[in-house]
């Protein structure tokens, strides 16, 4: 099977559900496809969310980006899911922004590292910033998912993100597309969630995924056990929502 998509999950705001989305979608896709999850966030939440402790990480995205001898095949490690591999993050990655500055073709470093990958899907969990790590993800990606929290100030900063995506399209990745906008942490008891949801739909129209991720305690608890929502509580609302979202992603990338 040829590769369907390299998907960057991006929003420079923290706490909008990027990592939960990256881990959940990667795990769900891995039921039927070969998947690589790249943890590009120095906080390494996607790494710990798949049950891998910091002291178990020998090769991380830091080496993949900055050590020319580190190949993807060495960096990608197995997870509890047979068809899901992970390039772990580590705290070293926090210094990568500075170290990449002097590198030739610095924006293309991740793209070149992924060039020989043969996974059906590559999911990139981006850091909460629009720095050089995120630019690397956008340059490597075929498409972008933007999680938007349905709360106050949800749309604040989105214009800056859209400008960055446009700038990357003009300079390093003309084929980059927005796969979809995902509404997260939706609370149907809260009128504000509905209001923000309507604003997002009126702005992004058909780009908005039909699936909405609810505010769900089980989703919040799962990472602390090093499990995805499908292992932790497969009957929860969060689990059902991410199954539905993954189905939409497969349809949009087919």
Image: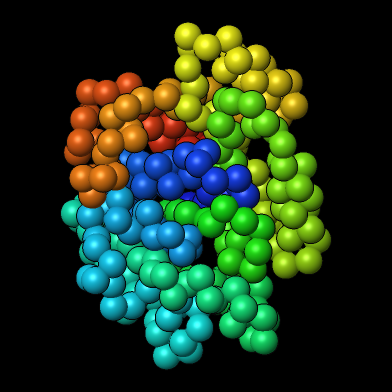
Residue 118 horizontal/vertical position (percent): 40, 66
132 is higher (above) or lower (below) than 204: below
Whether residue 83 appears in this view of the structure is no
Residue at 32% across / 21% down in the picture? Answer: 237
Q: Quadrant of the N terminus?
A: bottom left
Residue at 44% across / 31% down in the picture? Answer: 245
Q: Is residue 6 left or right of residue 227?
A: right
Q: Say which of 131 and 177 sits in front.
A: 131
Q: Say which of 176 and 203 sits in front.
A: 203
115 is higher (above) or lower (below) than 86: below
Residue 80 horizontal/vertical position (percent): 18, 54
Q: How is the image coloured?
A: rainbow
Residue 78 horizontal/vertical position (percent): 23, 64
Residue at 57% across / 25% down in the picture? Answer: 150
Whether residue 197 appears in this view of the structure is yes
Q: Is residue 27 left or right of residue 21?
A: left
37 is higher (above) or lower (below) than 136: above
Residue at 41% across / 36% down in the picture? Answer: 246
Q: How many numbered dots are placed on residues in this image?
A: 0
Residue 253 horizontal/vertical position (percent): 52, 43
* Residue 180 picture quarter: top right
């Amino acid at each position: 099977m040829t590769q369907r998509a390299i998907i960057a999950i991006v929003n420079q705001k923290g706490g909008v559900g990027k990592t939960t989305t990256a881990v959940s979608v990667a795990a769900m896709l891995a039921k039927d496809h070969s998947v690589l999850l790249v943890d590009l966030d120095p906080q390494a939440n996607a790494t710990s969310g798949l049950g891998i402790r910091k002291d178990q990480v020998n090769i991380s995205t830091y080496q993949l980006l900055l050590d020319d001898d580190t190949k993807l095949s060495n960096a990608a490690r197995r997870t509890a899911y047979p068809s899901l591999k992970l390039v772990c993050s580590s705290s070293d990655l926090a210094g990568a922004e500075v170290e990449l500055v002097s590198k030739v073709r610095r924006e293309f470093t991740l793209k070149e590292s992924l060039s020989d990958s043969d996974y059906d899907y590559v999911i990139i969990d981006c850091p909460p910033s629009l720095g050089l790590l995120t630019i690397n993800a956008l340059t490597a990606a075929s498409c972008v998912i933007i999680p938007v929290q349905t709360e106050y100030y949800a749309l604040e900063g989105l214009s800056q993100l859209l400008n960055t995506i446009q700038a990357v399209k003009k300079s390093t990745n003309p084929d980059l597309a927005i796969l979809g906008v995902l509404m997260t942490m939706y609370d149907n008891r809260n009128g504000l969630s509905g209001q923000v949801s309507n604003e997002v739909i009126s702005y992004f129209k058909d780009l908005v995924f039909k699936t909405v991720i609810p505010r769900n305690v089980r989703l919040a608890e799962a990472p602390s056990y090093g499990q995805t929502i499908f292992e932790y509580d497969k009957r929860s609302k969060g689990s059902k929502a991410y199954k539905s979202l993954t189905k939409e992603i497969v349809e949009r990338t087919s």
